[in-house]
């Protein structure tokens, strides 16, 4: 037993040391195989002697149980954001303000660091042990993501060296571009939606309730600031703070440099801008921080940002290439969007081969022709766009772009109503592209929220001639679903269940899900409140529809047009026959808004409704949803782990409802029905 304890200790030290070499210093000394061997041996010993197991063991990074929700935690000190400098003159102003405030000093020492494009995270170590990790949240309070952060191999569970009594270290969690590309390939293969950019992927990965999923995501963290420090060394500069973080085994940017004055900042910026395409992660600028902590203190803060630091953003990247062709993509409402197919070109570290041209007016305004040399731009996470054509390089063969008269997908006539920028395919659900997008929209999270119905599955169902409209979804059974390529029996059953669950919805969601042109969530909510029932909306005249707050003639015409199409009417009827339902009485005329004038407060986690859903339903019934309990609160809806708000309600003698009570109040089906 003693021998085992000693071996366990030795193994943990070796693993910690090699993890540090590999993940933090990028300097591995043993092979992956040998590393895995150490881990395996440790795992075996811990299985044999469970009394030797501790939460800080490197085998215990991934907790086994998903949580129901993230707890809210308060940061020891607010997590601030930074002001932006977009051009050199902004940096010049910043530097002048700093020097003036410090009493017209000469050149100031700054530390310049890459501005990583990820999300800010705070980690607290008590007596050297990782205690808690939290997202930035609103700066004051964030979400407790400790279980997820523990799965990142580059973050030590115990600090090395002489650990302080308390350390709050702050930094950025991000996903390197290579890992991002791999993850998206996997997403596509699994029929899931790819992430838009590495930052979204990092955020999505960190906000998983199941840490086992986070553990599979290629996340890294780089530390850039101290939040709180107790019982540690006396630090006088930011450079020294970064060195101290490194000494405790935390990763800091290898690019951080002390620079002198404005010129030092601008030189650093130019150098890093050149390096940017070679960096393995995305950065969106440089952060300059006054190095001397005493000076930082003298400068202080304005609103939410320090006066001693600024983020100097890189301009959007541009490159020259050639337009090979212009294709037209058909969207959910039939809108034809011209897309330029480009000679592939590297812009800001990514290859761009397509760029949106928005609409025909835009093409005419910029006079872009097929064959033209063009400048394309990619700014951060936005879709690449063509900035301008270079007519001086225009070949004789260049061709003017014309809108096709027939839909490129279904050959229905294309129409462009007067005064509108958008041309639309008139095929509606007869058009395969519109059908696909209509089903995708119907199933999307804020519509009927059918989990597991990804693009690949929709495409397969359309190919198999099983899906002509969203109504066909309710005719599918798990045997049919299981017969699709790459679909397992379990996934088929889950999808089937998700489709069945979607039948219970609300009128605003259903209206939104129909995908009527120009009818977003807000408009759907307004229409539901105004009319109270689908039948009244579908039979209203355009003039009546226009009576709805914030609804103009264009939207009214789209709504009328939608319900004038017999195909749509038939689909709606089939959806209702299949059992899709909501409570019409809720917002019906007469009893139009049963909860009007009442204020509700939501707290804790409800078993079967997200906070968004509960809020939406209450608001659809006319209630106001507030964040704090007072004498005027009508009732508090409390779920699991409700905290002070519930206590306050009880103290004030305010009605407390659970989810079942809420459902009853709103006249909607009990959970699971
Ligand atoms: S310092 C008071 N340093 O940028 C100083 N922030 O726009 C607070 N960021 O929320 C932050 N790299 O998420 C700092 N080297 C760096 C950074 C950095 C990225 C992020 C951070 C912050 C945001 C502010």
Image: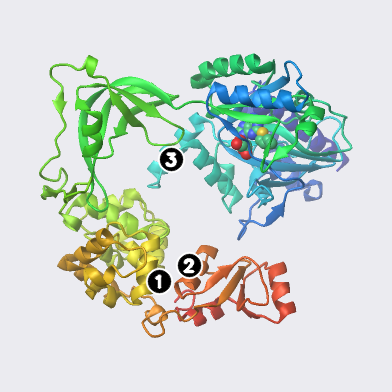
Tell me: residue 394, above or below residue 660: above
**Label 2 vs label 3: CA separation?**
27 Å
Q: Earlier in the sequence, mark 1 or mark 3?
A: 3
Asked whether disc 1 touches disc 3, contact meaning CB atoms under 8 Å apart, the reply is no
Of circles 2 and 3, the one toward us is 2
Q: Nearer the viewer, residue 265 or 650?
A: 265
**Label 1 vs label 2: CA separation?**
9 Å
Secondary element at tag 3:
loop
Q: Which class describes the residues within 10 Å of circle 3: few (<14), some (14-19), or many (20+)?
A: few
Secondary element at tag 1:
loop
Asked whether disc 2 touches disc 3, contact meaning CB atoms under 8 Å apart, the reply is no
Asked whether disc 1 touches disc 2, contact meaning CB atoms under 8 Å apart, the reply is yes
Q: Nearer the viewer, residue 142 or 50?
A: 142
Please provide percent x and percent y for residue 111: 70, 22
Q: Which residue has dot 1 on it? A: 506
Secondary element at tag 2:
helix
Q: Which residue has dot 3 on it? A: 196
Q: Is mark 3 within 8 Å of ligand 1?
A: no
């Amino acid at each position: 037993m003693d021998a085992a304890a000693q071996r366990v200790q030795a193994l943990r030290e070796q693993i910690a040391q090699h993890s540090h070499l590999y993940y933090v210093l990028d300097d591995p000394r043993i092979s992956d195989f040998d590393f895995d061997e150490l881990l395996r041996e440790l795992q075996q010993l811990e299985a044999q002697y469970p009394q030797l197991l501790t939460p800080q063991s490197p085998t215990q990074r991934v907790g086994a149980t998903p949580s129901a929700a993230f707890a809210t935690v308060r940061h020891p000190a607010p997590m601030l954001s930074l002001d932006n400098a977009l051009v050199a003159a902004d940096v010049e102003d910043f530097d002048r303000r700093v020097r003036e405030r410090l009493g017209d000093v000469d050149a100031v020492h700054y530390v310049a660091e890459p501005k990583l494009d990820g999300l800010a995270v705070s980690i607290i170590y008590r007596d050297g042990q990782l205690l808690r990790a939290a997202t930035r949240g609103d700066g004051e309070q964030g979400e407790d993501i400790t279980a997820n952060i523990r799965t990142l191999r580059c973050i030590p569970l115990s600090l090395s060296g002489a650990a302080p009594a308390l350390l709050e270290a702050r930094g950025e969690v991000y996903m390197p571009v290579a890992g991002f590309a791999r993850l998206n390939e996997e997403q596509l293969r699994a029929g899931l939606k790819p992430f838009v950019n590495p930052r979204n992927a990092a955020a999505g990965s960190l906000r998983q309730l199941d840490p086992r999923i986070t553990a599979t995501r290629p996340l890294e963290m780089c530390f850039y600031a101290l939040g709180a420090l107790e019982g540690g060394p006396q630090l006088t500069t930011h450079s020294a703070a970064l060195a101290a973080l490194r000494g405790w085994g935390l990763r800091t940017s290898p690019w951080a440099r002390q620079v002198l004055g404005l010129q030092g900042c601008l030189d650093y910026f130019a150098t890093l801008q050149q390096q940017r395409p070679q960096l393995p992660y995305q950065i969106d600028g440089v952060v300059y921080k006054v190095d001397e902590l005493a000076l930082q203190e003298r400068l202080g803060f304005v609103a939410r940002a320090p006066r001693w630091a600024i983020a100097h953003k890189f301009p959007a990247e541009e490159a020259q290439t050639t337009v090979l062709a212009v294709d037209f993509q058909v969207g959910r409402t039939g809108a034809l969007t011209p897309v330029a197919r480009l000679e592939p070109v590297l812009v800001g570290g990514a290859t761009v081969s397509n760029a949106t041209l928005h609409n025909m007016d835009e093409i005419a305004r910029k006079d872009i022709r097929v064959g033209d040399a063009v400048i394309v731009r990619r700014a951060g996470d936005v879709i690449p766009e063509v900035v301008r054509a270079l007519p001086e390089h225009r070949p004789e063969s260049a061709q003017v772009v014309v809108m096709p008269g027939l839909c490129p997908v279904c050959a229905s006539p294309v129409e462009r109503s007067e005064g509108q920028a958008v041309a639309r395919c008139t095929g509606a659900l007869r058009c395969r592209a519109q059908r696909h997008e209509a089903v995708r929209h119907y199933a999307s999270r804020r519509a009927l929220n059918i989990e597991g119905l990804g693009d690949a599955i929709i495409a397969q169902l359309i190919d198999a001639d099983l899906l002509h409209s969203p109504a066909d979804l309710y005719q599918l059974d798990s045997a049919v679903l299981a017969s699709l390529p790459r679909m397992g029996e379990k996934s088929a059953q889950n999808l089937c269940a998700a489709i069945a669950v979607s039948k219970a919805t609300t009128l605003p969601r259903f209206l939104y899900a129909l995908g009527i042109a120009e009818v977003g969530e807000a408009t759907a909510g307004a229409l539901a409140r105004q009319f109270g029932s689908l039948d009244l909306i579908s039979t209203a005249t355009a003039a009546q529809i226009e009576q709805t707050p914030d609804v103009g003639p264009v939207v009214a015409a789209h709504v009328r047009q939608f319900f004038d199409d017999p195909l749509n009417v038939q689909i709606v009827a089939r959806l209702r026959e299949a059992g899709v339902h909501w409570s019409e009485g809720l917002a019906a005329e007469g009893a139009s808004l049963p909860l009007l004038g009442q204020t509700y407060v939501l707290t804790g986690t409800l078993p079967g409704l997200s906070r968004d859903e509960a809020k939406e339903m209450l608001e659809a019934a006319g209630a106001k949803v507030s964040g704090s309990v007072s004498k005027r609160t009508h009732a508090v809806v409390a779920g699991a782990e409700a905290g002070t708000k519930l206590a306050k309600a009880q103290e004030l003698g305010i009605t407390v409802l659970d989810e079942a009570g809420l459902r009853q109040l709103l006249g909607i089906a009990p959970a699971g029905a």
